[in-house]
Image (tube, rainbow, N blue to C red):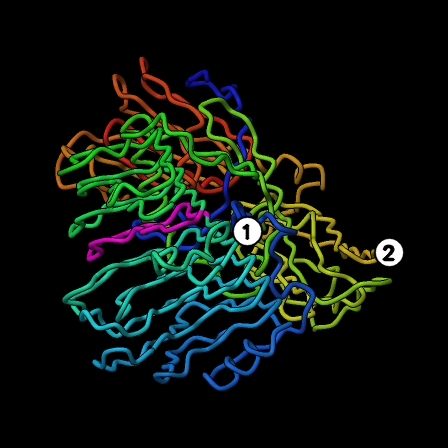
Amino acid sequence: MTHTSSKAASTLAIAAFIGATAATSTFAVTAPDLPMAGWATQNGGTTGGAGKTVVTVSNVSDLRKYAEAGNYTIYVKPGTYKVPSKSAISVGNNVTIYGYQGAVLEQTLTNNTNEDNTVMTIKGKNVILRNLTFKGAGSIDKDAGDCLHVDGGSNVWLDHLDVYDGEDGNLDVINGANYVTISWTKFSYTSASTEHQFSNLIGNSDSKTSDRGKLKTTLHHNWWANGVKERMPRVRYGQVHVANNLFNSNTSSTCVRAAIEADLRVENNVFIGVNKPIDYYDGKHTAVASTGNFLENIKKGDANADKASSAFKPSYSMGLTDVSTQSKAYALRDSITQYAGATLPNPGEGTSVTPVSSSSVAASSSSAKSSSSTGNLTSSSSGTSSSSVMGGGEASLTKHGSGSANQSVAQGQAIAEFYYTVTGATGASVTGLPDGVTGTMQGSDFHIAGTVSASAAAGDYKFTVTTTGGSSNATKSGTITVTPANGSTAASSSSVAKSSSSEGKSSSSVTVEESSSSLGTTSLAGIASGTHFQVETVGRSIRIAGAVGKTVALFDMQGRLFATEAVTQDNFEMNLSRSGSYILRIGKSTTRIQVK
């Protein structure tokens, strides 16, 4: 990578994972919509309720009805849903449950031994849960229920959940459940829990030998946060892949525990300030292969013991983020702490409820290689958006709404919204929109809306909406003409193509101060004292001043390193081929930046 103060800086051919963070002192927490990986991609894959009837619920009764019936995509409106004791919501076959921000499923406090107050149990096949919070009643050493468990279910993807304070445990995989992936989920306990803060079981009994050959589970990019003491997870019988997770609970006694006939692959995880990263328990485990883990301030134990052991080799391909240095490990840590939990957008706001499954996620690399999985993302800033609806057959698009498909709007102003009803197709996408205007699916309608970026180049933006998944797809086109905010004559349409590299059109500047501590993520407001660096984004360029003698590193939002360089001259520039959100580390300081 070349750094220069000229405008002809080298271009990084990188594939950014798009988030909705911005260069301000507070970051909007909107996670990248990453594809499925791990065991849930096997055995025919996991699609949940894709292509099934879409319903929106606002009470426990309706949630239970549709979840148990199966063959639904269920949107859960914001609110707290208290599930009565002995009345767990049982999820059937072919179901996606996706929460709006603020959708909380709450466990009933019982204080009674052996009274099952589990909130939700997954018994069906082909199930997806995303963007939900499970609030437990508080762990008090009673043999009660969990917040959530996969109880015999198969092909299950649990993604971007926040699960805490389960009275017995947080999330268990039990009774022959199989082909399960748990990703980007936060597990924790608060002061509501006083005992038995044991988060996750995979396999619930030594005597359940019928679990042999089952319990295949992948856990990646999860966060075992403060309050968790044990079971991160504890494994019996299953072939379990624990990769690229964060363990930094301040109350840990053990983390990953290998119990009877556990076959474990533990790799490229970040363990900070914990006890016993891997506990071999009674010595009856089958195998533990443990490699590539980052260890810092470990109080007891070694996560890389038994590293030569011949554990199972996954039948799927899943690239891993390298955490071999502190800088790389901290980048992964920062990404997980920012995005684990119920941090996805609301339905229809720039994410697919069931993004395309992928058995191959981009491999970790310090070279500037693009990720093939990026094509599965929905980006609000790239001018392309897609989603899923019921369909199949000959597709059509029918326009509705007060806004015209051909309209003029000034920079910084909102367009008149319009939408197309999609029939006979499984989705739709749009290309050619100006920055700030997006296409999103709401039910069976594809809406075009938004405020044109003040930095969008003036001119004619010819957009095309295209259906996807039909036996023959339909297209509709239009033109949004962007006029200058000052009312002067618009530039020709050819200037639009140059908008991504125009000088001074999209510029933001922040001052980052170097911390004396390398822990944590430096906010853009800076720290009280330290060395100042000036970071400016202009179009798709990052310009940094005051960093001579420091090392600058650039990461995607999953914590993967793309480039690093020792700075030998002041005022240098990095030009990026893609817009999006990035993690930028200068010396010991870390900040998040948005490149438009």
377 displayed left or right of 524:
right
Residue 441 at what x, y percent from top left? 64, 64
Q: Quadrant of residue 70?
A: bottom right
The residue beneath circle 1 is 40
Residue 107 magenta: no
Residue 6 at what x, y percent from top left? 46, 18
Between marks 1 and 2, how big is the CA–CA gap?
A: 30 Å
> What span is colored magenta in the figure?
218-238
Q: Which mark is residue 331?
A: none
Label 1 neighbour load within 10 Å: few <14, some 14-19, many 20+: many
Label 2 sits on a secondary structure element that is loop
Residue 463 at what x, y percent from top left? 73, 51
Q: Quadrant of residue 395?
A: bottom right
Label 1 sits on a secondary structure element that is helix
Residue 232 magenta: yes
185 displayed left or right of 547:
right
- Between disc 1 and disc 2, the foreground one is 1
